[in-house]
Image: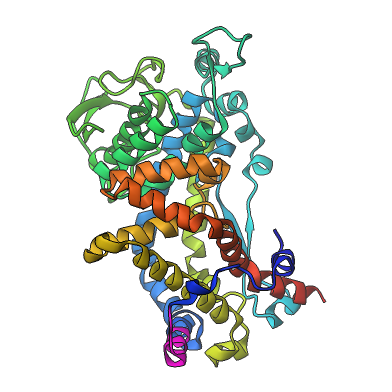
């Protein structure tokens, strides 16, 4: 929804009742909040320091993206083959940007850098279809069997049972993006395994979900550093290990906490090969010891590995733009004085609104308000109700946007109940707050894009 529509829909937006303004903050408090945010992000000194720190972190960042991004993208290829999802649809595999300098009119409005999404479907047409992906990346002698192995989309009353894949929209979103987003949110292996299992159970997905997602990505991330495999391992980060009969052994911890020894030879074994003790029946392909990937000129990387490598190199090169990305839509005069900054004002509005929400939550808790940790959990739960269905640009949250409000509510209760919160209290908080949910979500989106839209419009005049 455009900002102007949000604004004209209700000038007193959002429609909070009078008691929602219990929170009192002095002018001095508000001024300090503005100054702190401006000093850390938008001032001239902040831009200079952020730029210097980005250069200092260049090596650490390079190690991180090579290890993290390659593991995510390569594991998603195997997940896509198992569930008939084209590579171009997988996130974060399909997320990439190019940075461009602004036009003069844009620079006058404080737009210092433009980030344009790269359409992988247009750049690499074979990523839009699994059969074309197989044709482009797999050796000719293995293509037919792999095409048969990926199955087809099922239609009730038409497709034979167990010869097709049924993919309801929400379940598909979970596999396409959300499962990997949770890995970034929940870095503890046990917590990550639990939340995947909890959400897949709620979605009534096949019980093999934890195995085909968690075990695969953990095996792949472990193999990155425990052994050396072409297309996966990194020089200086991976070990040369003993090879017996063309196979090397990798030990990883599975979703049940068991240490499992797996013998592998190539990258495709880890991605989508059938491995005893890891692969449920129907979720792996029987592969030869040699790689099924096609190597152009018998020495270059497979095309999809080249795509991922180029993406990571681009991310490394764009690190220098970090300071300008943070300070974008920030005019030179706004770098001098926080009181003139539109971005600071938007931040202050949302910060104040968040403080109101937290205060409201505290006042509803009664006896449960004695434990500070428990209070924070309930406040985070209410903030999650708002934010997870109102993300502007973060990937992995489409699943929650495509749920109905009722579906999201039941999942939200089950999730926080599993974290130790009281189910009755959660439902009471929801009932008291639900009248404001959609207005606050719209307010959040509006504040997030307000400055960007206004500056882009002014640059066109």
Q: Work out which residue is located at the far top of the displayed protein and give it.
A: 160
Observer-nearest residue: 164 or 55? 164
Q: Residue at x 41, y 68 (%)?
A: 360
Color encoding of the figure: rainbow
Q: Which residue shows up at 44% across the image and 53% down it?
A: 430
Residue 421's place in the image compared with 274, above or below, is below
Q: Is residue 23 left or right of residue 318?
A: left
Q: Position of residue 280 (x, y in %)?
A: 34, 19
**Viewer-proximal residue, 186 or 254?**
186
Which image quarter is the C terminus in? bottom right
Tag count in the figure?
A: 0
386 w.r.t. 188: above or below: below
Residue 155 lies, in percent from the top left, at 62, 16
Residue 393 visible: no
Please name the predominant secondary structure of the magenta segment in the image.
helix
Q: Which residues are magenta?
A: 23-35
Q: Is residue 188 left or right of residue 26?
A: left
Toward the viewer: 60 or 182? Answer: 182
Is residue 118 visible in the rendered image? The answer is yes
Looking at the rendering, in which quadrant would you find the N terminus? bottom right
Residue at left offset 29%, top offset 26%: 264
Q: For residue 337, which quarter of the picture?
A: bottom right
Is residue 315 covered in magenta? no
Where's residue 50, x and y in %? 43, 77
């Amino acid at each position: 929804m455009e900002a102007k529509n949000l604004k004209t829909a209700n000038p007193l937006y959002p429609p909070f009742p009078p008691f929602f303004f219990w929170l009192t903050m002095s002018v001095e408090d508000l001024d300090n909040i503005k100054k702190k945010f401006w000093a850390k992000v938008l001032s001239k000194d902040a831009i200079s320091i952020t730029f210097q720190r980005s250069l200092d972190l260049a090596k650490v960042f390079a190690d991180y993206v090579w290890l993290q991004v390659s593991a995510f993208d390569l594991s998603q290829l195997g997940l896509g083959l198992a569930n008939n999802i084209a590579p171009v649809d997988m996130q974060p595999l399909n997320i990439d940007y190019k940075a461009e300098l602004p036009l003069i009119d844009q620079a006058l409005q404080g737009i210092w850098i433009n980030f344009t999404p790269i359409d992988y479907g247009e750049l690499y047409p074979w990523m839009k279809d699994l059969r074309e992906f197989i044709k482009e990346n797999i050796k000719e002698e293995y293509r037919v069997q792999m095409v048969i192995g990926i199955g087809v989309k099922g239609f009730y009353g038409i497709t034979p049972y167990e010869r097709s894949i049924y993919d309801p929209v929400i379940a598909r979103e979970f596999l396409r993006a959300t499962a990997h987003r949770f890995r970034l949110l929940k870095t503890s292996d046990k917590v990550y395994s639990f939340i995947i299992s909890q959400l897949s159970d709620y979605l009534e997905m096949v019980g093999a979900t934890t195995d085909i997602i968690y075990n695969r990505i953990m095996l792949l991330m472990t193999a990155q550093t425990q052994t050396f495999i072409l297309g996966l391992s990194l020089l200086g980060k991976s070990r040369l290990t003993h090879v017996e009969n063309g196979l090397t052994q990798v030990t990883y911890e599975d979703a049940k906490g068991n240490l499992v020894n797996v013998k592998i030879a190539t990258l495709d074994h880890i991605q989508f090969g059938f491995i005893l003790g890891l692969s449920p029946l129907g979720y792996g392909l029987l592969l030869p010891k040699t790689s099924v990937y096609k190597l152009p000129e018998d020495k270059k990387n497979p095309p999809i590995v080249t795509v991922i490598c180029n993406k990571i190199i681009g991310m490394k090169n764009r690190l220098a733009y970090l300071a300008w990305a943070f300070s974008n839509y920030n005019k030179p005069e706004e770098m001098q004085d926080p009181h003139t900054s539109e971005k600071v004002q938007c931040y202050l509005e949302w910060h104040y609104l968040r403080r109101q929400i937290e205060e409201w939550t505290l006042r509803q808790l009664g006896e449960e308000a004695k434990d500070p940790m428990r209070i924070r959990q309930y406040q985070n739960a209410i903030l999650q109700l708002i934010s997870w269905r109102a993300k502007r640009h973060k990937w992995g949250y489409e699943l929650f946007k495509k749920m109905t409000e009722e579906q999201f509510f039941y999942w939200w209760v089950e999730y926080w109940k599993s974290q130790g919160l009281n189910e009755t209290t959660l439902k009471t908080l929801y009932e008291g707050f639900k009248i404001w949910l959609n207005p606050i979500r719209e307010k959040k989106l509006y504040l997030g894009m307000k400055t960007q839209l206004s500056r882009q419009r002014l640059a066109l005049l």
